[in-house]
Image (spheres, grey):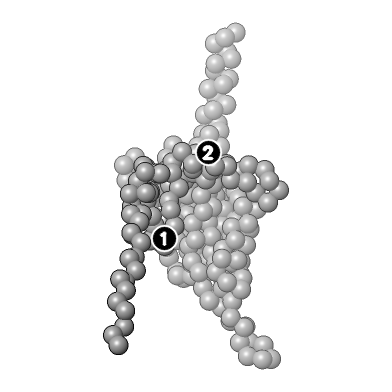
């Protein structure tokens, strides 16, 4: 016998999810690549960030806020690292390598100082040398934008000759002398390094030459003239 024919059951109608979503939420939602929904601007403004203790935290500044909190006041002293050497000391286990730094510091006026120090790395050596340079600063006399008189100083094997120059001459000097004079208020100078080329000895010779500067009023020939002018002025007043 043939099986009794029965009609196949009808499947329920498919729901239109898109139409339902459009009816419930008419605002379009933006989805990230990870599948999460982005936060609306209104929600972000109303949201308050809190720390561990529950206190509200302020929002971090963007790139435009960078640098506003930095201290841009000019420094009183400027430093220049003239030379860095690698030195070694022989011990029982072998050689112990260290670094030696030569640093100059000045205020672009009439104060200058140099310092030498050693350290396990370059940074520590420079910091120690800078601290020593600040402690050993000297003041010297100037005649306008040049030195008061010619001077030749010698430190160990280094011999440095410095002469005053007319305005507009500039600084005619070598590497170490130029680095040190550049931290002072001297704008016109003629110098020549004689003898040894050791940078440490040349630096000490330059400092000795600046320390030995005598102002024009205290020269031997000008002291008598200064007293004579004072005495003549007092006589005229009487």
Q: Identify residue for label 2.
A: 46
Residue pushed farthest bottom?
A: 93
Along the line of sight, the residue nearer the viewer: 22 or 132: 22
Cβ–Cβ under 8 Å for marks 2 and 1 = no
Q: In 3D space, how far apart are the residues under numbered discs 2 and 1 (Cα atoms)?
A: 23 Å
Along the line of sight, the residue nearer the viewer: 13 or 65: 13
Along the line of sight, the residue nearer the viewer: 20 or 81: 20
Q: Quadrant of the N terminus?
A: bottom left
| Residue at 43% over, 53% down | 37
Q: Identify residue for label 1.
A: 35
| Residue at 69% over, 91% down | 92
**Residue 97: which quarter of the image?**
bottom right
Task: Provide residue 157's location: percent of width, then percent of height.
Answer: 51, 70
Task: Provide residue 51's location: percent of width, then percent of height.
Answer: 65, 49
Instruction: Single out the mark in the foreground, 2 or 1.
Output: 1
Which secondary structure, mark 1? loop
Along the line of sight, the residue nearer the viewer: 61 or 25: 25
Task: Provide residue 228's location: percent of width, then percent of height.
Answer: 55, 24
Q: Residues within 10 Å of mark 1 (few under 14, many from 20)?
A: few
Q: In which quarter of the image is the C terminus?
A: top right
Task: Provide residue 18's location: percent of width, then percent of height.
Answer: 33, 52
- The answer to whether residue 55 shows anywhere in this view is yes
Q: Is residue 52 left or right of residue 78?
A: right
- The answer to whether residue 171 shows anywhere in this view is no
Q: Which of marks 2 and 1 is nearer the N terminus?
A: 1
| Residue at 59% over, 57% down | 130
Q: Residues within 10 Å of mark 2 (few under 14, many from 20)?
A: few
């Amino acid at each position: 016998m043939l099986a009794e024919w029965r009609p196949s059951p009808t499947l329920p109608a498919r729901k239109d999810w898109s139409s339902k979503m459009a009816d419930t939420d008419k605002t379009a939602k933006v989805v990230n690549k990870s599948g999460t929904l982005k936060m609306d601007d209104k929600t972000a403004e109303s949201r308050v960030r809190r720390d561990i203790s529950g206190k509200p935290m302020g929002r971090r500044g963007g790139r435009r806020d960078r640098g506003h909190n930095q201290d841009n006041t000019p420094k009183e002293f400027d430093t220049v690292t003239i030379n860095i050497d690698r030195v070694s000391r022989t011990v029982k286990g072998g050689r112990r390598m260290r670094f030696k730094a030569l640093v100059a510091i000045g205020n672009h006026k009439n104060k200058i100082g140099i310092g030498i120090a050693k350290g396990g790395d370059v940074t520590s050596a420079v910091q120690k040398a800078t601290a020593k340079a600040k402690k050993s600063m000297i003041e010297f006399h100037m005649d306008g934008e040049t030195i008061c008189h010619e001077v030749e100083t010698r430190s160990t094997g280094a011999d440095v000759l410095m002469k005053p120059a007319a305005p507009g001459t500039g600084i005619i000097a070598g590497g170490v002398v130029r680095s040190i004079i550049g931290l002072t208020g001297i704008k016109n100078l003629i110098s020549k390094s004689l003898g040894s080329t050791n940078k440490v000895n040349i630096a000490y010779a330059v400092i000795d030459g600046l320390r030995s500067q005598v102002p024009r009023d205290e020269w031997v020939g000008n002291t008598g003239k200064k007293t004579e002018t004072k005495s003549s002025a007092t006589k005229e007043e009487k």
